Each structure stands twice: as structure tokens, then as C-alpha cells.
Amino acid sequence: MSDFPTKARVVIIGGGVVGASSLYHLAKKGWTDCVLLEKNELTAGSTWHAAGNVPTFSTSWAVMNMQRYSTELYARLGDEVDYPMNYHVTGSIRLAHSKERMQEFQRAASMGRYQGMDIEILSPEETKARYPFLETHDIVGSLYDPHDGDIDPAQLTQALAKGARDLGAKILRFCPAEGVTQHDDGTWTVHTPKGDIACDYVVNAAGYYAQRVGEWFKPYGGRTVPMMVMSHQYLLSEEIPEIEVYTKETGRKLPLLRDVDVSYYLRQEKHGFNLGPYEPNCKAHWDTADDPMPEDFSFQLWNDDLDRIEDIVTDAMERVPALGTAGVSRVINGPIPYAPDGLPLIGPMPGVKNAFEACVFTFGIAQGGGAGKVLAEWIVDGATEWDMWACDPRRYTDYTDHDYCVQKGMEVYGNEYAMHFPRHEWPAGRDKKLSPLHSRLKDAGAVFGAYNGWERANWFAKPGDDTSLEATHTWGRSGPWEARIREECEAVRDHCGMLPITGFTRLKVEGPGARDFVDSLTASRLPKEGRVSLAYFPDARGRCLTEMSVMVHGPDEVGLITAAVAQWHDAEIFTRQAPDGITVTDHTKDVECLLVTGPKSREILDRLVEGHDLSAPWLSASFEGHVAGQEAALLRVSFAGELGWEIHAAPDAMPAIWDALLAENVKPFGMYALDSLRIEKGYKAWKGDLSTDYSLLELGLDRFVRLDKPQSFPGKSALQTEADTGPKKRFVTLTVEAGDADAPYMSCIWHGDQIVGETTSGAWGYRVNASIALGMVRADLAVPGTELEVEIYGERRNATVQPDQPLWDPNNERLRA
């Protein structure tokens, strides 16, 4: 083939809507020398049989951004690339059967309002007026999204492809990728039956074949892609005369209807309906040895399996009786890929340099436009406009085995429209990684949550407490956990508590110049030997990549501790840039951590400790000594904001230490109490308060930003410019007259009739007896005493900006005692 491209800057594997969008957006950013490979025709896979719904609704800030962008792109794409598009913006109605569902809708409407979308909350009567065929007797209201609609997936993909081709990018149909080879300089060769293509970057956009493609990257540091495949059915009805009359009289289609508490959508299709259920008794495919994934399943479907969805279809016919007057004209039953949380994988391929993922899209049509934008930003700019951690492939690590992915995928599918309450822990796929203290925690009444696969105690129940999943179905603060959290916080305040922080990510950077290498990546000053300090690592824009605890053991060895869920993300900050001779190793499983904290902690530890100086000042690190006869290191730090130490010891040593502390009447406390305690101190949590949505200076981390460091570091010039002009936003602590619920992540902050910021986390502070929100506001309003309002589930609650210091122990006297 004389026109076969033997070189490209980027090769994208997969010609569905996401692959085409990625190619289009790369070309729009000037990277026109890119190639897309499709083994069949464009849209083969999930794209061709997708229903084509295009919602903006999400309770994830990142996903809402992505879907909002898609609707904006699709509205102009046909004209932009000169291609006919069937894009119907019909609006949508989501029905609510309960107060809790209406609260969820209010939260989503608030987020949408912040992003410039005029989402409305409707009464049952207003809902009926928008959808006259609807039975509303048992609903309490609805959410109306005027931007929702549907699009022809094939036309969308072809339009994106045309736009990419017109800009100079190439698409090779019927040209499957057959493997990849990475070279010493990090570049790639992608192998095809028509020839090899040399390239700088490779993108896995292979849809439900993404796991198979992902195996090619294992020799270069890759892992098995965490995903599974679900069977999803939707029905097309025969035409219904009443619908035809409605459309002719009004000149429009009915809004897309979703009964989320029953779990289906109902969309007008021509003059009939498209009914798409998400049934709890769902079916996985290609998940067992006797049901292998075929080599090619491009334009194929499975046989109907209507028994699975019979109850939902019956309910839909009762909700919209007109549906029951028509027969079924066609059933579509095809494969849809699912990640364990139902969100896609977009971003750097874990462990592999110069490789990216844009795959496992459950709602690829709705998210495809935004996904292409995000993927192009990752590759070209090295960072995305919006923080995309919710979709980052590195959010999953080594616990996502096949069993986990299948269990979680089925759980997500069967609860596609479920509410994600703040105290609810989903039960599937649990107990993947257990602490050596696990049985002791159970004996103490622990109610567990999963953190990067590790089981940690969220709170400790007493006999008779309701620990059922049903008890967690509330957005409110109160529940069987509240009294226990209060007791745990009071024990830490008045006596001494202990919290196992299982799964802390532990990295060691070693080799000639290791200290200087770490120093070159942080805006902070590294501590002296024998001390521990926080360090902040910015990206090139000065935005916050991560926060780590740092211990310098010498010029050639640095220890780092960071969040459990940040394990692969933070390791790659170093591994992707390490010079020759510098190694980065992970020791997470080698050490267990127990936080012991409270005003009596020194007195109690003094009876158990040998070889450690408990009078050493705050932020001291001691590595040689024993606790309860076990070798252990002590760090004098406490995320709870009280006098305290972290005990770091080998996993098999920790049970004896736990038993000794329990014998001293030290009270176990959980992650929920820790969240309350840390928020009273204004301590920021990763990927809540700390994210790439904000710069280090916006986050109020000025004292950790050393612009006078002789070393350069990422984002230094951007931070210097920002320091000279002043940040436009500022991080604040608010006390809120919150009522029954504390502020969730990304609640709108109002000043009069203007949205002036957003919360990043919120909780009740049991030591200060107040609801607290951390958040970001317009800089001129970040003045102590400023009166604002925080919107919590649709209710605007009075809030007051607090001084720039902790609410609890503002001078850190207890911490330094």
C-alpha cells in the first residue's frame, strides 16, 4: 500500500466513537500526523448498537464536565465538519419516588447550575405537563434537564472521523492492530497485517476488546485491564398513534424519561418507544472458560433474554400506559464494557510509558466528545483542564482480579441508577486485602470500608447497632454510626484512641542523588534527616498533583508515604522521570501503620516503648526501637490534630502492639471519626480538597511553596506569576448552619445571587460542635467573617468564613504538647 503510513505521532487502536473523538481532538490541537486502526468498519463494537442517549446528569464532577462538553460539541459538530447529524435535544425527565431521590436531584441540579446548565426541579403536576402520557400518582417530583437528548451513534462517529480526516489524520479500516513493541527510547511499533507503524504514543481505545489489547503491554510494565462485559438489552416498540399525534401537534419529541428508582429509560423512537432496562438479575458475558470472547464480535448481537427484564417492562407500561398498547418490533441485546465502578478508563496506562487508555466506556456516546478532549489534553499537554481522577486508570491497582471485576460490574449494572449515599459501602468484591488486625477489628465491632482494596474500619458498632446496608440510605448525618463517631472523637480529644491506617502507600527513592531528584519535583523544602514533613508536588501549571510525607534518610535515599488510593498515581510521578541510577520501589505491603493519638498517648506509650524518645518534638522520626516488644518506627505526627504518633511496624508485629494498647484502654476509632477530626484542623484530603483543579497557592499552601529554592521544579514559573498577581480563588474554612446534612463535595457556595465557589469537603466537627465545610471561593470573599451560603441538597444554608487557622487548637498547642 503506497499510502500506508509507516510513521505517526500517535496510533489509536479502536474505531468506536471514543477512538474517533480522540483522533479528532488530537488533530484539532495540531497533531494531525496521527493514525486510527480499526479491525472492521468504524463503529464496530458497542458503538453501533448503542441507544445513543446523551445526558449531562451525573453526580461526578468530572463526568458531568465531560458529558456537558459532549452536548456542546455535538450541537455544533455537523456544521463544523460539514456532515449531516441526527441530534435531537429533547430534554429529559428523571422521576423521584422519595425525598432522598429528590435530594440527589437537587445536588445534581446545583452542580449543573455551576457548570452553566439550567437544570430544573419539577413537581408532579409540572412533570405531567411536560410528559402528558405519564402516570404521576406515586412520584414526589422530578428533575428536568433541557440539554438531554439522543444522537445517531454511527453518524456521530463518522462526523468525528470526517473532521479528523479533513485535518490530515488517517483512519485505516479493516486493519487490525496485532501487537506492539516498545523500544529503549520509549517509542513504539504497532504491528498490523498491512505493515508496521512507528509512533511516539499508543492509545488503547478498543472498547470491550480493551482487556485483550491491554495484554500486549504487559511486557512493558502493564497490567490486566480492570473490566468485564455485560449483556444489555433494549426494546423498540411498534409505532403508537397517540405518540404520532403528539409529535405532529407539538412539533417535538417527548422528553427522554428515566424512572431511576425502577431502573430504566424510555425514549421516543420515531412514533414508538425505546425502552432500556438495567435489571438487578443481570448477566455477564465472556466471564467464564466455557464462554470465551470470540475473535471478532463486531456487528453481532446475542439472542433475546426477555425473562430477565419482564418486571421492569411491566412497570414501564404502568407508568406510561401508551407503551402497553404496542407490540415489540425489535430487541437489541449486545455487549457493553464495565469498569468496576462503571466509569471509563481515560489517561496514562499504568506502568507503561507513552501509552494511554480511552476505553471501557459504559456510556460512550454521552461521554465520547468529552473523552476525546481529555485524552488529547493528556497526550499533547501532559495534563487535563479538569481533574479527571474519577476516570484515571491508575485509580485501580493490584486487587482488581477477574472475580472482582465481574462482581463489581454486575453490581454497578444492577444498580445503574442507584443513589450513592455518603455512608453506604457497596458489598460486592470485598475482602481483597486484609490487615493482620482484621479479625481483631471485627471483634471490636468494626464496620468496614474498602480503600484501594484494603479493608479499613470506618466506625465501631456496639451490640444492637443497626449495621445493615438499608440504614445507610440517607444523605443525612444521623444514623446508627453518629453516636459512635462522637464517642470515638471524644476519646481522641479526652484520652487516647488508635486507628489502623492499613495500606498507606510507601515508596522508597534510592540511588546517587535521590534526594536532589525528589527535591526537583516538589515545591516544598525537604526535611532534615530524622524529621518528617509534608511536601507538595505540582504539575507544570502549579496545580496540586499530590501531597506526601517525606523522610530523608541521606543524600541517596528518601522515604515517601502517601494515600492508599494514590499508590500507582504517585509512584509514577517518580518512575516516569527517574534518571539512570535512581530506583523507585514500593513497600506498601511490608509495613502496617497504627495511629495512636490523644492527650494521654505519651503517658500510655511510655509504658510500652523502648529505644524511642517520646519527648522528641512534633514532626520527629525515630526508626530504631520497640513498641510492646516489637520492632517499630515512630513518627510524631497525627492527622487527628492531637498529641500522637504513627507506629510503623512489620505486619506480623502489629497484633501484639494492638493487644498491648487495648490492654491500656486505648479506644479504637475509624475513618469516619478521622475525617471529622482532620476537618476541624483544616487538613486537606487528596482528590477531595487537593486536586489539579487548584493551584498550590489557591489551596492556601503558601508556607509549603518555596519559590526561593535554588532548584527548579514543575510549575515554579506559574506559581511565581500567580504569587505576583495574587490567586483569583482562595481556600477557606466555613462554619455552616447545616441542618441535618453536612456539605458534600462540590456544593455551590453563594454570595447573594451569585455562585462564588464550591465546597471540597464537609463534616460535623464533634470537638467544636459545628458543621464545617472546606472549599474554594472568590479571593475577595476569603475574608474572616464574610457571610456566604452553602447549597446542601437544594437548601441554601448560612455559612461564615473563618480565620485562616484551625478551628480546633488553632495554635497547635495540643499537637506540640
Image: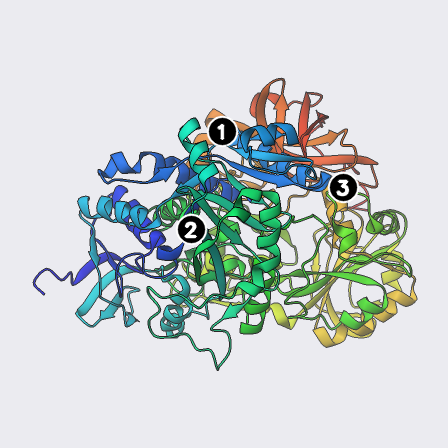
Q: Position of residue 177 (x, y in %)?
A: 27, 68
Label 3 crowd bin: few (<14), some (14–19), many (20+), radius 10 Å: some
Q: Position of residue 176 (x, y in %)?
A: 26, 68
Question: Mark 2–mark 1 contact, CB under 8 Å?
Answer: no
**Nearest the eye: 670 or 120:** 120
| Mark closest to the chain's N terminus, 3 or 2 | 2
- Say if residue 415 shows up in the picture: no
Residue 19 relative to residue 474: left or right: left
Q: CA distance from mark 3 to mark 1?
A: 27 Å
At horizontal 23% and vertical 39% (from top left) the residue drawn is: 81
At horizontal 47% and vertical 31% (from top left) the residue drawn is: 722
Q: Amino acid at mark 3?
A: Gly
Q: Nearer the viewer, mark 2 or mark 1?
A: 2
Is 637 drawn above or below residue 222 in the view shown?
above
Image quadrant where residue 296 sits:
bottom left
Outermost residue, top side: 752
- Does dot 3 land on a helix, a strand or a loop? loop
Q: Amino acid at mark 2?
A: Ala
| Mark closest to the chain's N terminus, 3 or 1 | 1
Task: Name the residue that disc number 2 marks.
Answer: 51
- Say if residue 231 shows up in the picture: yes
Is 479 drawn above or below residue 708 in the view shown?
below
Q: Amino acid at mark 1?
A: Gly
Residue 106 relative to residue 267: left or right: right
Task: Name the residue that disc number 3 marks.
Answer: 476
Q: Position of residue 469 (x, y in %)?
A: 75, 57
Outermost residue, left side: 2
Task: Name the residue that disc number 1 marks.
Answer: 116
